[in-house]
Image: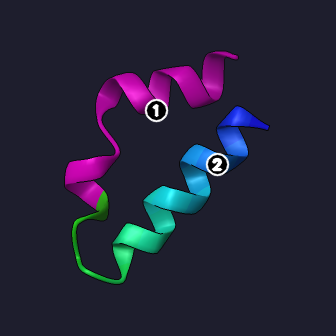
Amino acid sequence: EEKRKMVASAFAEDQTGSFATRLTVEDLRYLFMV
């Protein structure tokens, strides 16, 4: 559930072109490890 929110907000930010800056390496690590 938490992951889904993170991904959703990250992709929402993508519309403003700040997806890369919002999703950090730590975020990716969290998404794939948990």
Under mark 2, the amino acid is Lys
- Compared with residue 13, is residue 4 higher up or lower down, i.e. above or below? above
Q: Residue at x 31, y 62 (%)?
A: 19
Q: Which residue is mark 2?
A: 5
Q: Is residue 3 left or right of residue 6?
A: right
- Compared with residue 31, is residue 19 higher up or lower down, i.e. above or below? below
- Compared with residue 27, is residue 14 higher up or lower down, i.e. above or below? below
Q: Is residue 21 left or right of residue 4?
A: left
Residue range highlighted in magenta: 20-34
Q: Is residue 8 left or right of residue 20?
A: right
Q: Nearer the viewer, residue 7 or 29?
A: 7
Of helix, strand and loop, which mostly describes the magenta segment?
helix
Q: Which residue is mark 1?
A: 28
Return the x and y of residue 16 as percentages of the image width and height: 26, 81
Q: Tell me, yes or no, whether the highlighted magenta stretch contains residue 24.
A: yes
Return the x and y of residue 20 as percentages of the image width and height: 26, 56
- Compared with residue 17, is residue 24 higher up or lower down, i.e. above or below? above
Q: Residue at x 64, y 48 (%)?
A: 5
Quarter of the image for the C terminus: give it.
Answer: top right
Describe the element under mark 2 as helix, strand or loop.
helix
